[in-house]
Amino acid sequence: EIVMTQSPATLSVSPGERATLSCRASQSVNSNLAWYQQKPGQAPRLLIHGASTRATGIPVRFSGSGSGTEFTLTISSLQSEDFAVYYCQQYHNWPQTFGQGTKVEIK
Amino acid sequence: EVQVVESGGGLVQPGGSLRLSCAASGFPFSSYEMNWVRQAPGKGLEWLSYISSSGSIIHYADSVKGRFTISRDNAKNSLYLQMNSLRAEDTAVYYCAKVGFGYSFDHWGQGTLVTVSS
């Protein structure tokens, strides 16, 4: 099983600042990686697939990069609605696996 | 508009069974792969099971293999998860999720809560 490790667990950021979230895979997943956003009481929402392609309707301030084992989600200028938990997911191998999540909170 | 709506959750005793349903609309259901994902209270996301568009290919997480069965009825635009031998650690919100690009999940339902307790 591929283990996905996200860091940091919690990220404190002021509105308007840049946020950088990391996701590491225990073995290569090529570009078979997605990022999701989840707000309290809501279902996850797909942000990024293929490591760097924004999903439909996702604002350009969200960007993904990386391949192989190291991935990054960057939120260029945090808006109030961006404070949430973010998960990475690999879909390179079965079982698909998620990271444990990074909570982005208001500083 | 794409919609997936789960139902069938509730309170069940350890060792019991429950069948979850997911009703899909707004897209050609028979052409898309589907998954079940769960989230225990206060915890992260756990992928459980995948089914191909025809139902001929199925995968399970080890945590549910042999206890849970995924299925679909394309004529009814519905996905199912039969859960047997339920344990306290199966307590979670269960989501159905439609596969988009690659095997990413582009649409999720609102979830249905399953509580396993005596």
Image (cartoon, coloured by chain):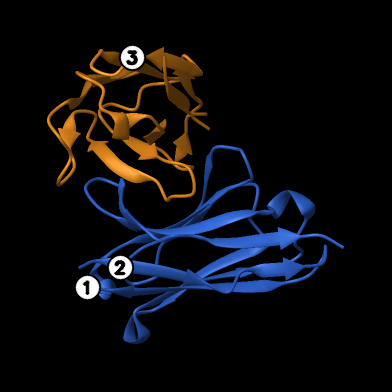
Q: Output the chain of dot 3.
A: A
Q: What type is the residue that disc 3 sits on?
A: Ser
In the figure, the shade used to draw chain B is blue
The correct choice, above or below, for B37 with respect to A38 in the image is below
* Same chain assignment for discs 2 and 3: no
Whole-percent x and y of residue B31?
23, 69
- Residue at image x 46%, y 25%? A103
- Residue at image x 87%, y 63%? B118
The correct choice, above or below, for B103 with respect to B52 in the image is above
Q: What type is the residue that disc 2 sits on?
A: Gln
In the displayed structure image, the side of residue A106 where residue A56 appears, left or right: left
The correct choice, above or below, for A56 with respect to B19 in the image is above
Whole-percent x and y of residue B24?
33, 73
> Which residue lies under the disc numbered 3?
A14
Q: Badge 3: how crowded within 10 Å, few (<14), some, or many (20+)? A: some
- Residue at image x 41%, y 40%? A38
| Residues at marks 2 and 1 touching, judged by CB atoms closer than 8 Å | yes
> Which residue lies under the disc numbered 1?
B26
How far apart marks 1 and 3 lie (CA) works out to 38 Å
Secondary structure beneath disc 1? loop
Q: Badge 1: how crowded within 10 Å, few (<14), some, or many (20+)? A: few
Whole-percent x and y of residue B25?
28, 75
Residue furthest toward the bottom?
Answer: B75
Q: Nearer the viewer, mark 1 or mark 3?
A: 3
Residue A33 seen in the figure: no
